[in-house]
Amino acid sequence: MSGINSIEREQKKRRLRRRIIEPGTAPAGSGRGGSHRENEEEIVRKAERRTRRKRFRIALIIITIGVAAVFSVLFYKENHRYTGYSVVWEKEIPASESSFTEYVKFGDNVLKYTKDGASYIDRSGNAVWSMSYQMKSPVCSVNGDFAVIGDQQGNDIYICDKSGCQGQATTLLPILRISVSAYGVTAALVEDSTASYVTFFKKDGTELDWAIKTVMSGNGYLMDVSLSPEGTQVMLSDVFLQDGTLKNRIVFYNFSEYGKSYPDRLVGGFDGLGDNLCPRVRFLDEGHACAFADNQLLFFSLENVTSPQLAAQVPISGEIQGIAYTDSYVAVVSNYPEGENDSLLNVYHSDGSLAFSQGFTYAWQQLDIDGDFVMLYNDSSCRIYSASGKERFSGEFDFSVSKITRGSRFNTLLVTGGNTMRELMLK
């Protein structure tokens, strides 16, 4: 038995040796050892390549689906035409005894101002802050995080940010126009019987040592004033008499370090308006400004703050009936007696290039821009266009409307009317 066991053990050893692959040698009994190993390695490499290709295809499919989903959402947000709405919530706003009530967009919320006070209302209809005053004819200017309320033909000015009133100022002469910077610097255009003046205040209401004066018998009468967001650049519309005819020029002042070397800090002007008058001027942002004349728009570039340049002079067909502006867009509605439409809406980029032009027939009362929504509305209906000119919504409301702004989501509106604020979801 021991001999048989020895033979079996030897046979097992030989079989085991034949299965062992030594480095650089082939298995026992093979006449093509190198080729066999190369075939195995090639099989492994092909398997790995198939695995990598499969993983790449899966990743590519996932990325493609993700990109398609993003583009679908963006396309929906920018092009979907809404046909109705639902009321998400509504809230009563404390009523005012004043017969005059105005709403302006202030940051992401709404500033309500009347003859006897103002309140800052958030997107949920809650009053963040309120203050009282007495004014005969309140006017308001908003820029960034600051708003200023002044009494036109009066003397009182209230300078506010999103947390409340930061300062109060008083002018010696009646106020014609007011403007505020994004940092609270306030300009008040005032006048007496012989001259126009621009007086400046810090955000706490103390007076700055800046001053602009024009004498009516000499260099003219000031119609409007605008401060740049940083508060160091000033834009004015100046009317003067030349050869018995009223002329208008747009002038720029700079009260930063750059303007020190210029007489009276006057750094530029433009008087190519012909017989047109320009009752409104506005800085759109620190590098762009716009002047609104009778039948034309003038876009200025202030890339060089001491050398303002006329970037575009755009004629407007018909009589201008309404304007709106943000830091990115300027919208103008003019009457349009030609063709089947009564009015023409033109929207421009801040450099003066045309974004879109749209004829329409609609009994609008207010024109606003909020984000990429250009909104025409009256006290019971609304029409909204995208910044590319697509009509996004047109509908009637069963409640009164005073102010419309964008809501908390891309497809919601905040609608204030009477003593009620509502958030509407467009659908």
Image (cartoon, rainbow, N blue to C red):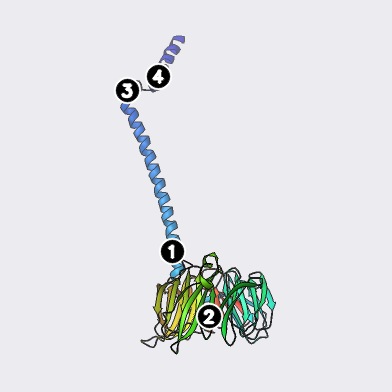
Whole-Å distance between the Cαs marked 1 and 2? 45 Å
Whole-Å distance between the Cαs marked 4 and 3? 12 Å
Residue position marked by numbered label 1 in the rendering: 72
Of residues 218 and 398, which is closer to you in this image? 218
Residue position marked by numbered label 4 in the rendering: 17
Contact (Cβ within 8 Å) of mark 1 with mark 4: no
Q: Which label's residue is closer to the chain start, 1 or 2?
A: 1
* SS label for mark 3: loop
Q: Which label's residue is closer to the chain start, 4 or 2?
A: 4
Q: Which label's residue is closer to the chain start, 2 or 3?
A: 3
Residue 259 horizontal/vertical position (percent): 52, 68
Total labels drawn? 4
Q: Nearer the observer, disc 2 or disc 3? A: 2
Whole-Å distance between the Cαs marked 2 and 3? 101 Å
Contact (Cβ within 8 Å) of mark 4 with mark 2: no
Of residues 169 and 402, which is closer to you in this image? 169
Whether residue 209 sits left or right of residue 278 in the image: it is: right
Q: How many C-alpha atoms fall within 10 Å of the one at disc 2: few (<14), some, or many (≥20)?
A: many
Whether residue 328 sits left or right of residue 39 in the image: it is: right
Q: How many C-alpha atoms fall within 10 Å of the one at disc 4: few (<14), some, or many (≥20)?
A: few
Q: Which label's residue is closer to the chain start, 1 or 4?
A: 4
For the question of whether residue 296 can be seen, the reply is yes
Residue 273 horizontal/vertical position (percent): 42, 81
Instruction: Residue at 40% x, 16% y: name it.
Output: 11
Question: Which kind of residue does numbered mark 4 sit on?
Answer: Arg
Q: Quadrant of residue 310?
A: bottom left
Q: Nearer the observer, disc 1 or disc 4? A: 1
Question: Which kind of residue does numbered mark 3 sit on?
Answer: Ser
